Amino acid sequence: MTVTINDFNVKEKMQWCPGCGNFGLIASLKGAMADLGLKQHETVVVSGIGCSSKLPHYVNTYGFESIHGRGLPVASAIKLANTDLNVVAVGGDGDGYGIGVQHFIHIMRRNYDLTYIVHNNQIYGLTTGQASPTSQLGMKTKTTPWGVVEEPFRPLTVAINGGATFVARGFVGDPGHLKELMKTAIAHKGFSFIDVFQPCVTFNKLNTYPWFQERVYKLEDSGHDSTSKSAALSKAMEGEKTDYKKVPIGVFYKTDKPTYESTLPQIKDTPLAKQKLEIDLSKAYEEME
Ligand code: SF4
Ligand code: MG
């Protein structure tokens, strides 16, 4: 049976501010899932906590809203339990690059076959506008009334160096392009990561839709070689290096290597969830007597 984008809709009203970039992101994600023909009962969307992390409630698949910064460990556990599932983790910049950053680093170096999409609005939205790890230098927020003085976290350079086998950046203002990125990421065998510019229209008055529209351009129009790690790192820093005059989106880096699951003899042929439970505990009980 053909899957359409409507199959991924739910009745629940989406609790985001009017104009929030999360609406564009979820539309692209549902479109990507429909185009790939993913079946709802074979797909799980997992999140942490934040505005972004409400997303699993609004997609008609299996879902899990975990705790702050912990979407990725839950997603990787789901993948290990049943390698037949399509697993997509979502989160925000505060959630994933702040409290959850250690999971980001360790899970991508293992190369689980899952997709991680970060709604990067460069601010804490749900808690009403504090500086996040990706807030720009000098940006004034509730917690930085004189401007951010810390260097921003650089998710793409961390991912390219950290072992992610697919690294991309999208912008919700170009939902067709974002959908294609998501399709490629989900189809990729290994840890695929997309950092998505998702304007928070309520609390981030600097990185707005027009701000991005003036600056973003597509890597595929620039002759970028996504198999080259050094070229990918250079492009990942282009925004900062040009004082944000040019900010690329698209696939920065892509490579192939065995997934974590495929190297585990216990599950490489049959998913754990489909194996017969044949554990003989009698010897252990004898030893305890
Ligand atoms: Fe979107 Fe910002 Fe509103 Fe959260 S606070 S729903 S990120 S616009
Ligand atoms: Mg945020």
Image: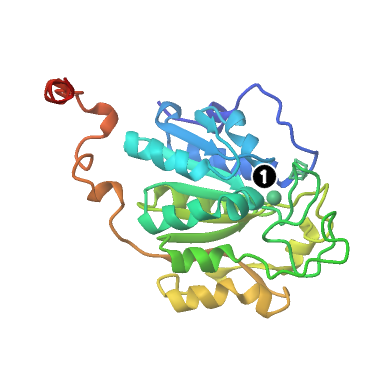
Above or below 68: residue 94: below
Looking at the picture, which amino acid does disc 1 mark?
Answer: Gly
Q: Nearer the viewer, residue 209 or 154?
A: 154
Could you tell me which secondary element the residue under label 1 belongs to?
Answer: helix
Whole-percent x and y of residue 107? 42, 52
Residue holding disc 1: 24
Tell me if I can see residue 223 in this picture: no
Q: How many labels does the image show?
A: 1
Position of 270 with respect to 111 (left or right) is: left
Point out the image quarter for the N terminus. top left
Q: Which of 19 and 280 is in front in this view?
A: 280
Tell me if I can see residue 151 in this picture: yes
Position of 245 with respect to 25 (left or right) is: right
Residue lying furthest right in this view? 145
Q: Nearer the viewer, residue 42 or 95?
A: 95
Position of 18 with respect to 233 (left or right) is: right
Residue at 53 percent of width and 69 percent of height = 157
Residue at 83 percent of width and 66 percent of height = 147
Whole-percent x and y of residue 76? 41, 42
* Quadrant hosting residue 80: top left
Whole-percent x and y of residue 7? 53, 27
Residue at 66 percent of width and 73 percent of height = 239
Q: Which colour scheme is used?
A: rainbow
Whole-percent x and y of residue 188? 39, 52
Point out the image quarter for the C terminus. top left
Residue at 36 percent of width and 55 percent of height = 110
